Each structure stands twice: as structure tokens, then as C-alpha cells.
Amino acid sequence: MITFRIARVEDAPRILEIYAYYVENTAVSYEYDVPTLAEFTERIRSTLVKYPYIVAEEDGRIVGYIYASRFAQRAAYGWAAGTSIYIDRDYHRRGIGKLLYEKLEAILKLQNITNLYAGAADPMEEEDPYLTRNSENFHEAIGYKPVARYNGCGNKFGRWYNLLWMEKIINEHCVPPKEVVAFSELPENAVQEILKD
């Protein structure tokens, strides 16, 4: 049975273990080097101040995670968030990603976030040993629409890759906009209700 909870900084070693596979073996992540544990721990800590960071567990073991982050630095982008998701390679195609996104989006709605953006690495060739179009297909299946493609903007393993930006609108664009609520300021009972459903 898969359960969900908010990540803790103590989870960093296991979350980093999941992420390291994608850094070292795929073009899913454009990082070349696996972050240090200290750096990765700080990423989790700093994310949780403003945005949700959720883990999926099976029998107490983390098998996937998702988080949101600031989409861009200018103040006018404050209602937009980027999303990132990674599933342990042994747990693909079990619906965990879709469930993680449902939890994340429900919390971001409470925060009054309106637009979500997912960047999906995109192979330039049909057959690529380091990348498929699974991320693009998955995001389309859960309601994201392609809005921009940066051609040949990334190079990893000596190969060029595109970056596909995908968008999903999750809240009404009110005028004036509702104030964005930091994740750390949300009522804990409201967050727990979303995670247990």
C-alpha cells in the first residue's frame, strides 16, 4: 500500500538515492554531478518554507517524491510554480506519479497558485539510450499541455537535448489575485487531509 507524507530533511539520503540514478544514467536531469548530501538536504529544507515536498512510501520506504518551486524570480510570477517528480526506477507504471501530482496540486490550490510548469527533457532523435518521451506523455495524460520547446539547449553524455515546457492551470485567475500562502503557513490539518485521501 502506498502512503503519502510531507518530506523531512532526514529523508534526504533516500531521496538523493532515487535522484542519483537519474543524474548518473539518464538525461531526465540536466545535472552532471550528483549533489552532495548537505546540498540536497538544504534543497529540501528551503523548498518546504514556501512549497510542498511530498514523498510516497511503501512499507515505510520512500519510492518516489514530488515538489514545487518558484517558477521565476520576478514578483509578477508569484502565482506560478514549477514542478519536479522522481519515482524509484523499480516502481514505475504503478500510478504513484499520478497520485503524487494529485496531492501536490491540491495543496498548491490551497496556496492560491494558479499555473504549474513542468520542464521535460526531450530527445532530439527517436532512439536515445539516455532518454524517452515518457515524461512528456505522462504529463499530457494528467492534463499538462506543451507550451514551449527550447531546441538543442542541453548537452549531456555528448548528445544534444531539447527542453519541453508544459503547463497546467489549476486555479482561477482572479482580479485582484488572491494572496499566495506559503506552504509553511497552511493549516497542518488541511494538508494532512489531502495526504491521507
Image (tube, helix red, strand yellow):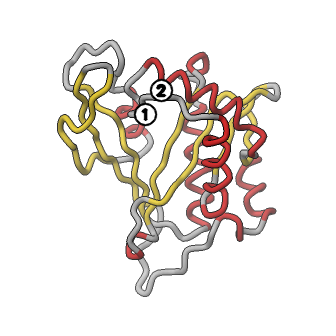
Q: Are marks 2 and 1 in contact (CB under 8 Å)?
A: yes
**Three-letter amino acid code at the position of disc 2:** Val
Q: What residue is pinned by disc 1?
A: 31
Q: Is residue 149 above or below residue 93?
A: below
Horizontal placement of 121 versus 85: left or right? Answer: left
Q: What residue is pinned by disc 2?
A: 23
List x then y, in percent, for residue 1.
76, 27
List x then y, in percent, for residue 46.
63, 56
**Closest to the observer, 133 or 174:** 133
Q: Residue at x 61, y 73 (%)?
A: 181
Q: Residue at x 42, y 62 (%)?
A: 115
**Closest to the observer, 193 or 65:** 65
**Closest to the observer, 74 or 164:** 74
Disc 1, SS? loop
Horizontal placement of 43 versus 140: left or right? Answer: right
Residue 197 numbered mark, or none = none
Q: Is residue 23 above or below residue 187?
A: above
